[in-house]
Each structure stands twice: as structure tokens, then as C-alpha cells.
Amino acid sequence: MGLLTIDEDRCQKDGLCALVCPFRLIALEVGKTFPRAVPGAKERCIRCGHCQAVCPHGALALPDMEQEWPPFEAGRLPDLAQLTQLVRGRRSIRVYRQKSVDRELLGRCIELAHFAPTARNSQQISWLVIDDKEELRRLTEHAFDWMRSLLASDDPLAGHYGVQGLIRAWEKGYDGILRHAPGLVVMHGPQDYRLAQMDSTILLTTFELIAFAQGIGTCWAGFFQMAAGNWLALQEALQLPEGHGLTAAMMVGYPRFSFQRLPPRQQTRLSWR
Ligand SMILES: Cc1cc2nc3c(=O)[nH]c(=O)nc-3n(C[C@H](O)[C@H](O)[C@H](O)COP(=O)(O)O)c2cc1C
């Protein structure tokens, strides 16, 4: 089967499909010939779907991508005030209700975040949600072991991150790494995929905004991620698929408190040329 099919009754030979193709894999003489895939296109195509999505006449189809293609109405987007609510209103949540986030709701947020961009549309990053209290505790204990090792080796990071205080608090029952969050979203991808970190950050950033809009609190788990990158026992306990590494992690849970004000930021460092 070819890469694309053209409905010749519908095609207006306007060439939009060729213009939006990121790798110029579609050729035609505008107004004269029907679009066709160039030699080798099937192998080089990243299945971004732009050619089919842009066609105003519904003339082009990608047989490889038979899933539903819902219509998109460009006029129906959140306005700036709504976006301000979303972007400025999102907070890092560090105090959670002790109730697991509904898996179906969380799953829907993840499914939507999955539409965020990935390099070459390669979609190589996987999601793992851990909402088992005991497992979270075990993982956190490993992360604290990493912190203890920093302290024991006089690593300057220990002072920088206030590791001694965090360990002391943990020993008294306060979790300063995962903040007693009832859930942890772990992103993981192939260790040899160079843009895994970048893709994961984009996916989780998108997820975080969606989750916030759905009443779910989140917080980047930077300490946990550092521990996972440096502590073998934690890597093993995570039991990720062979050849995969943790690329990002985020706490999730229902927030205990709501915020009443939007905190300011430092002035934007923006220059123009
Ligand atoms: C990469 C990254 C790692 C972070 N790691 C942690 C963390 O381990 N623990 C934590 O409590 N907050 C963590 N944060 C949250 C930041 O402290 C927070 O985003 C910042 O203070 C601004 O607050 P806001 O998110 O409520 O706007 C992290 C944020 C980012 C972007």
C-alpha cells in the first residue's frame, strides 16, 4: 500500500499538502497534476499527519493512520484571560489530600497530554503511574538513601539542597521528596534516545496544565529524578523496561488547599533583534 491515497474527484491540486510536509515528501505541479509521494517517502515520513489535516477538500488520506481525525475549529480556542488563569494559576502542589487520583481521570489527562509534540513525532516516551502507597514509600526510601550517600561523601550538593534537614524530617515522618503525594507519574524512554529528556519535559508540562484544569495538583519531582539518575537501587526498584531510563517525574494528587493570589515572577528577560 502506498503512503497516501488521493481522491481525484475531490483534489483541487492546490498543493497545500506538499507545502506543509516537513520533509517535502509530496510532489505535484500545482493546478496541473495530482499530489504523489516522492520515492522513499514511505520510509522517511514521520506520520505527523499535516498533509491530511490541512486539505480543505478531504482529498488526501494516509492509509497507515486510519484512526479518527476529528475536525478542528481554529476559532474555538481559549482566550488570553482563560490562558492566564491556566498558566498563572497553576501551582506546584506540596500538600495533598490522602486520596488517590481517580485512575480514569488521570488516564484521560495523560491521553490528552500524549498529543504534545515529540522530536520527529517519534512518540518514544512511556508513562508509568505509581499510586500504590507502599511502593511509593519504598521508592522514596531509596531516594533518601541517595541523599544519605551525598551527605556521607561530603558532596557539595548535600549543602545546596539542604539534604541533612530533609533526611532528619523523613526520619520524623515528613517526606520532603514526594511530599506524601498519593501518586507519582514517571516518564521513561530508551536510554539511547537523545531527546528523551526534552520530549518528556514537554509531555509532562502539557500534562501538568491539563491536570490543573481538571482539579488535580502536581509538582515536579526534581529530587526524585536526581536520585533515580544516580542511585542504582532506586533504578532497580523502578523496574522500568530493559534499556529504559527515567526521564522525568511528577507528583500527583488532589490539593489540600487552594491558592487565592497569583504570585509574581521576576521580570522577564526578553530581548529583541
Ligand atoms: C525541573 C523542576 C524540578 C522541580 N523539583 C521540585 C522538587 O523536587 N520538589 C518540589 O517541592 N518542587 C520542585 N519543583 C517546583 C518548583 O520549586 C516550582 O515550580 C517553583 O517554585 C515555582 O512555583 P510554582 O510551580 O507554584 O509556580 C521543581 C520544578 C521544576 C521545573
Image: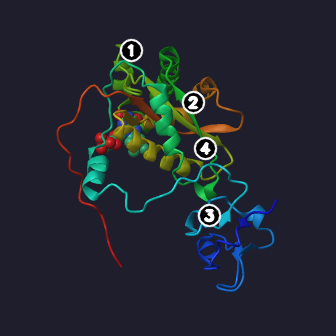
Q: Are marks 3 and 4 in contact (CB under 8 Å)?
A: no
Which numbered dot is residue 125? 4
Question: In the image, 92: left or right of 49?
Answer: left
Q: CA distance from mark 4 to mark 1?
A: 34 Å
- Foreground label between 1 and 3: 3
Mark 3 is on which residue type? Gln
Quick one: SS at disc 3?
A: helix
Q: Are marks 2 and 4 in contact (CB under 8 Å)?
A: no
Judge whether residue 154 can be spotted in this image.
no
Decide if ligand 1 comes within 8 Å of the CB at mark 3. no
Q: Quadrant of residue 212?
A: top left
- Foreground label between 2 and 4: 4
Q: Earlier in the sequence, mark 1 or mark 3?
A: 3
Other residues around mark 2 within 10 Å, as few (<14) / some (14–19) / many (≥20): some
Q: Earlier in the sequence, mark 2 or mark 3?
A: 3
In the rendered image, which residue does mark 2 sit on?
A: 231
